[in-house]
Amino acid sequence: MQSCLRPRALSCQEPWDSTVASPIKATSSRSRCAVSVCWLAMVSAGSGRPCSTALYGPLPGTAQRTLRSTRSTRLSARLPAPPQSLTGHGLFGGLRRQEASRVLRHGVPEVAILGGVALVGALTRPRSAPGPSARLVQETERLRAELEAARKEDLEGKGGRTRSRLQKALRRLSNVEAELEAATDDQDQYPVPGYLEEAANSGKIMLAITGASGVGKSSLVNAFRRLRDTDANAAATGVKETTMEPTMYSFSASEGIFNQRFYRQLGDGEELNAGVRVVLGQVPGQTEGSCAEVLKASDEKQTVQVRLDEGPVLDVDVKHVVGTALDVVIWDLPGVGTPNFPQTIEWSNGRLLNQTLNSLQSGDTLLIPKKSFHLMGGILAGALQNVVIQIDGSLIFSARKKDWPRHAGGGVLSCLRFENVVNLTLTSSGKGTLDGQGKAWWGYFEYLKIQENRPRLLEMSQLQGVLVERLLLTNAPYWTTWFSGVDGLEIRYSDILNRRSAYKGHGLFDLGAFNTDGWDVSGKNIWIHHSKVWNQDDCFAVKGSSSNVLIENVEASGLGLTIGSEGGNDRVKNVTFRNVYMDRTFKGIYMKFRDIAEGEVGLIEDVTYENIYIKEPEQWGIWIGPAQQSDSRRFWQGHPCSLLWPNIPGATCKAAERGIYRNILLKNVTIENPKLQPGVILSSPDYPIQNISFDSVRVVNWRGRKEKLQYKLCEGVNTSLARVLGATYLRRMGIRYFDVVLLITSSRFTEAELMLAEELQKFEVPYFMVRNKVDIDIASEILREEEALEGDDGDECELPKEDRERVEQQTVNCIKTYFASEYSVDRVYCVSSRRKLRSNHDFPSLEVDILEAIRKQRS
């Protein structure tokens, strides 16, 4: 092999296309393979996908299973949910790297190092995490105590200065309580996801790595942990490995910045309880920086008994405890490009659940563990009695519309349906989820194509003594629920969420999720309480042939607290809605009749709406009259009242004939700032409303009808959709609870990753843009130059060391120039996770900057 003395120069002006693979890059790229795992081992390997027009049948080659009342049946496989695919566009500024101070001990900046244990701050969680901080809670308690003291002095008549102090304390407390309420609302919007609860509540320092499939996230996890990919406790890597669920890894090696121990300072008056791990200072006879577990504290709280990690037990003075020890963990998160599960898995899971439900006997409990399971819909269970179904995980139904199981006539089946059940309980130990992936079915164009031929998420018919509790039903393709033929139903602590965007209301784009009714019921003896609904149709709907219905202590935002749409000889009697809060709902109180044929009469009577607060309704606060809806592709026409009335000229709205309202009471109803007039009451002169009463019904802060309504605009739909998807991933994965997030790519950043970066920047979560596998690009460029210098005789040549170094530096510079010009990223870290190359390029500075970001998060 000859030495090549005149290598071709690499220019940054050349097109940079990392998708053009050299032989080296092609053989080094990681295949994007998904591992398919079935629910239970009893699924027959030979079972094929059933015809999409048929119901589920028994599994071929599997024995029927009889469940005993003394045990629970566990669905125990691991089918994690892939994160939603993110799309969008937008530019952002990356996190600027802070200049590091002098470096000691494996690259740790010289900041408060005590015997090899590094101080990171005093906070038990990241600053960017949602929810009230400990400081805010303490300040609120202090001001409340101060206010109470001032009130006491005022009652004792200690003069004007006390009165002034009281007024000042009231103002300060009001400001702090407003801040506390906002922080609490923020936490409600971004709760800790189930998989992250234990780690987040323990105060661990948490790093997150995310990115598309095949970019080398797992290899980078091993690099931070100073492990080889072949080590026993290393993250799995290879062409057949793809991160499909969040996986946590700890640091236990002896090298590297994050393999040392960290601690946080104790707060003033903070007590040391048994089980807490602490860091010791200058204890006589012990190494400074030793870690120990608190066994017990003395009665005077002056000394604590601890067990050192090395084993000995000793009593130490509290003043020698410098802080509590913190563990550092790194989470390998599923990338935004993680593929969907294979279709065969969805059919296998659906078939198995269908068979399992129909094998349950009286007294059985079916337990679905805290994992995510993907399955095809069309599940039908019948004749269950005295059965408990505990859904601790998530059932995620297929988004494959063309393959959805159907009736012989072509109508789609419900996702999950029960018939003829007695004493059935659907429950969860936490918050079980039914996810219909409705986004695949929603939209105006989809409605024009398939209209209402979409699956309900949960359906029950002919039921007695049913309890539904602690469930979340989300993304319903059509009605979220439909309970018919009810005699005894209680729904409690269960929520419905059918959002299409992050808009805090119901705009034109959002309403494209047609017919996503919330709790729809028909029957008698029904009680729904402590439930929240956000959807794009009726929130709580009492249908025909219903009596003795109580809906109370709920929140709703959609098309309202509904009775109807009724037609024919339907009867509804004795229905009460009370203690309801409706935030930016489309409609508030909504009672409606359809067109009723001649010779038939509909009746709604003895209805009470009490203690209802309707904040800024997008449309009407109160509507009692005809159904404002459409039953055809011509959704602008009225049946009997147009959806576009009164905003579009020519749209008509007429009262429904032969529909009678009788004995209607509205009591303590407040409508705040409706965008249209406060309400509509419209009935036929031949069938007038009988005995309707308004008691303390008021409209506050009404600014009158606006000429231009924001919800009628359809600007920036694609961008809005991308933003809400990015926000959904951030909320779903609990990204705000991490101290630092690393966005990884091995080529370009996708629009989804850029949108996620914007969300991180919005919530001030430190993040780093990392370009992995630069060694492959460098090798490719070197090979290209060597091939360009080969002679006609085909002799191979090898670049000298100094030219290889030049090509290496030019390649890295070109990558950084590309990211700066294409994405406006002012700092991208070029790294390689290969063990021999970890010290090259930006890997050392990346670790130092991560540590600095952690300190800022916890300070």
Image: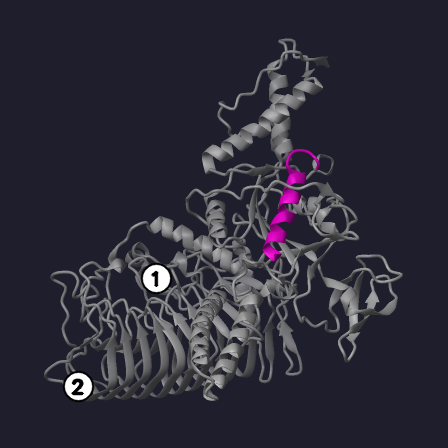
Q: Which residue is mark 1?
A: 513
**Amino acid type of disc 1?**
Ala
Q: Looking at the image, is 349 positioned above or below residue 240?
A: below
Q: Quadrant of residue 277?
A: bottom right
Provide residue 309's location: percent of width, then percent of height: 83, 62
Mark 2 to mark 1 CA distance (whole Å): 32 Å
**Amino acid type of disc 2?**
Ile
Q: Residues in magenta? A: 839-859
Front-lying residue, 720 or 325 = 325
Q: Residues within 10 Å of mark 1 (few under 14, many from 20)?
A: many
Say what secondary structure mark 1 lies in. loop
Provide residue 486's location: percent of width, then percent of height: 40, 84
Provide residue 301's location: percent of width, then percent of height: 75, 76
Q: Is residue 653 left or right of residue 107?
A: left
Q: Is residue 293 magenta?
A: no
Q: Quadrant of the C terminus?
A: bottom right
Front-lying residue, 263 or 484 = 263
Answer whether residue 33 is visible to the viewer in this image.
Answer: yes
Q: Quadrant of residue 202?
A: bottom right
Say what secondary structure mark 2 lies in. loop
Q: Which residue is mark 2?
A: 689
Q: Looking at the image, is 839 positioned above or below residue 531?
A: above
Answer whether residue 422 is visible to the viewer in this image.
Answer: no
Q: Residue at x 53, y 72 (%)?
A: 431
Front-lying residue, 154 or 2 = 154
Q: Residue at x 64, y 83 (%)?
A: 69
